[in-house]
Structures are given as C-alpha cells and as structure tokens.
Amino acid sequence: MRRNWWLTALMAAGSLTVLVPLYFTVVTALKTPEELAGAGFDLPRNPAWGNFAEAWELTNYPQAALNSALITVGAVALTLLTNSLVAYAIARNFHRKLFKGLYFYFVSALFVPFPIIMLPVVKQTSLLGLDNQAGLILLYVVYGLAFNIFLYVGYIRSIPSSLEEAARVDGAGTWTVFWRVIFPLLAPMNATVGILTFLWAWNDFLLPLVVLSSPDAQTLPLVQYVFQSQFNTNHTVAFASYLMALAPVLLVYVFAQRWVISGVLRGSVKG
C-alpha cells in the first residue's frame, strides 16, 4: 500500500500544535516556581503535586466543577430531546416549502456571529430573569440548534421511510413512531451532537461571562479567568488549575472521538 508521506508529515506537524502545549501545561503544573525560572520544557525534578491541592482550594474547584457539570448535562439532555424532534419534523416534510424554508432559516444562523447579538441577549435574559444556570442551558440549546439541525436532518433523511410506514400500519402514531423507531436509530448522531454540545458547554467562556450574574454560579472557565487575574504571577498553580479543568473534557473526547467523526460523516451524506 502506497503511503502519502506529505500528508503524513502534515498530520504529524498538526498533532504537534496540540501535543506541545499540552506537554508544556503538564510539566509547568508539576514544577516549583524556582524550576519554572529555568528551561520551560524541562521535566520537573521533584513533581510538585501540592500545586493541584492549592489550586483546588483557591479556585473552589468542587463548586465550579459542579456548576459546569449541571449546566453541561442539562444542555446536552435538552438539546438531544428538542433538536432531534425539530429535525425530524423538518426532514419528513422537506418536500414542503415551509419546512424547507425553516431548514435554511435555521442553518443560516450559522453565519451570524455571536458578538453581533450579544448585547440584546444579555438584556433579554436579565429582563426575563434568566441570568442564571437555567437561562444558560436554554441559550446553549437555542444556539446549538442551527448546526444540530444540519446534522440531524441529513441523517434522518437517510433513514428509510418504510420503517415508519410499517409502524403506522400497526397503529403507531407520529409520537410513538419517533420515540420507538426513529430515536433509537439516531444513536450515532445523538452521540455526536451530545459530545459536541458537551465540549462546547464545558469549555465555553463568553456565554457564562455575559449571562451569569451570581458569583456562586460561576463555571470552571470563569473561575480560571478570575484566578488568573488575581494570581497572575503564580504560574505553576495556575497551570495546575488549567489542567484540572481540562482533564474531564479531554477524557470524554479521547474515548468518544470515533462517535464524533462517524456521526458527522453520516450526517453529511444527505442535506
């Protein structure tokens, strides 16, 4: 089998852009301030595990991690339930002008930068009393709708309609057909949408910054920002806190990346 060495070299160079910063983060988090004054890429002589304990206390990691987990889990669950329903309605009525127009309307939102609508969103959430975790979950569901509709509709249109017709012959209604026939078949796409939503909600900084009004509701990215502004010279502890915030989402992606790739490929078969 012939190997494309240029493509292999390009992929290796691309992987270094991820691995080198990750390596630097790990070794910095395990160094003392004195060791950090030396060569940045040297391995620590005596790993300073106390940096993680100090970061745990200074950033109130358990509370911030719990806030991030609640928001992320809520966003993922509500996204899977609502976005798949909307996409199913569009996909099975795509021959109608109204639903085809709705599809392109939703997808067109992908080209609207968030900073353009940020100020109106902040004012509306404040007026409606949604400047909290529940409001943030709703915003993730709404703003993820455009890309998720694009994925779901393409995937659902690849599912034969004969499966639904057979269920209707047995007396199943539209609601039953979706939950008993279609939704189980959406497992690969649900996994893809769920993982992408998880990565976005867990790592997002801008939405929590402009929406959340209570300091007790701060997520991990916000805590990292506050910590960095207050202790900008304590680099070793800061990097330990970054690594603690990075670890959960990194583990999720490592074990679930095949679902992301396969789901995106399947969802792009039809549009």
Image: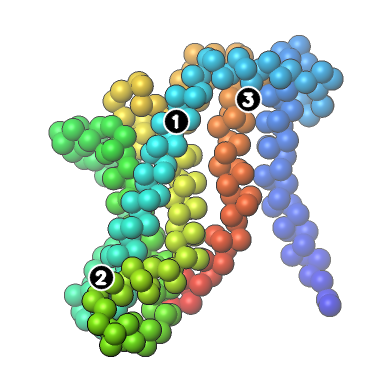
Residue 175 got which mark? Answer: 2
Please determine whether, in this image, residue 192 is positioned above or below residue 177: above
Residue 190 in percent (x, y) is at: 44, 61
Q: Earlier in the sequence, mark 2 or mark 1?
A: 1
Give me the residue at 58% from left, 25% from top.
241
Instruction: Between label 2 and label 1, give the one nearer the viewer.
Output: 2
Distance, label 2 to label 3, CA atoms, is 49 Å
Specify the amino acid type for callout 1: Leu
Instruction: Work out how far the residue at label 3 is from the one at label 1, CA to CA, in angstroms.
Output: 20 Å
Relative placement, left or right, of 41 versus 253 is right
Q: Amino acid at mark 3?
A: Phe
Percent x, y of residue 248: 57, 39
The local secondary structure at tag 2 comes to helix
Residue beneath label 1, please? 66
Spot occupied by residue 239 in the image (x, y as percentages of width and height): 63, 25
* Quarter location, residue 164: bottom left
Q: CA distance from mark 2 to mark 1?
A: 34 Å
Which residue in the structure is indicated by mark 3?
239
The quarter of the image holding the C terminus is bottom left
Q: Earlier in the sequence, mark 3 or mark 1?
A: 1
Q: Amino acid at mark 2?
A: Trp
Q: Nearer the viewer, mark 3 or mark 1?
A: 1
